[in-house]
Amino acid sequence: MALEAKMGAVEGVFLFGPFRLDVRERALLRDGEPVPITPKAFDLLTLLVRSAGRVVLRTELQDALWPDTIVEEANINFNMSAVRKALGDAGNAPLYIETVRGHGYRFLATVRTEEAETGKGEIRTHEAPPGLVAPSAHPIQPESRLHEPRREGRAGR
């Protein structure tokens, strides 16, 4: 089954962080500038963005990206690395793609969609109900905790 059939509608524009992913034009832009990405890595990113907020199993990736073909795990790893490189994402402190060990991957960023032809956008947020999300190897800290000032020494000194 083709990737388009697996993922639904082919056309669409997805906005996240400084990125614009235009599925119809098969273009990834960062702050309006083209980002080099291979066709297979583009398909992988598109699948993750369309599934933002939920874990996409490795078997789902294999079925969607390599239908009717047996592929080695290294193919997924290689393409995931290419996607992370294109996004400037680090596996040890991800902003966009979280590895859910033993299961698959989750796209972390909030994604806004835009109708490719009308320019009207809709905001999609991706928060799973408690208990439905697999434990993360790298839990996301609430924003307030990320910016807490460091305390030096002991209190009262």
Image (cartoon, grey):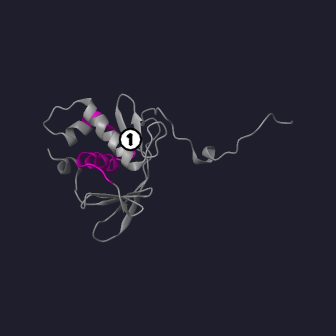
Residue for point 40% across, 33% down = 100
Bin the neighbour count of mark 1 within 10 Å (Cα to Cα): few under 14, some 14-19, many 20 and up.
Answer: many
Residue at far top of view = 102
The quarter of the picture where residue 79 lies is: top left
Residue at far bottom of view = 118
Residue for point 27% across, 31% down = 74
Could you tell me which secondary element the residue under label 1 belongs to? strand
Residue for point 36% across, 38% down = 105
Residue 64 is one of the magenta-drawn residues: no
The quarter of the picture where residue 76 lies is: top left
Q: Residue 112's spot in the image, x, y percent?
A: 39, 59
Q: Residue 141's spot in the image, x, y percent?
A: 56, 41
Q: Is residue 53 above or below residue 72?
A: below
Number of marks present in the image shown: 1
Q: Is residue 21 above or below residue 54?
A: below
Which SS type dominates the magenta stretch? helix
Q: Residue 62's spot in the image, x, y percent?
A: 23, 36
Of residues 105 and 81, the one nearer the viewer is 81
The quarter of the picture where residue 156 lies is: top right
> What are the residue bounds of the magenta stretch?
36-60
Task: State which quarter of the image contains the N terminus.
Answer: top left
Task: State which quarter of the image contains the C terminus.
Answer: top right
User: Residue tagged by mark 1?
Assistant: 106
Q: Residue 90's spot in the image, x, y percent?
A: 45, 41
Residue for point 38% across, 44% down = 84
Residue 46 is one of the magenta-drawn residues: yes
Q: Amino acid at mark 1?
A: Arg
Determine whether, in the image, residue 97 is placed left or right of residue 70: right
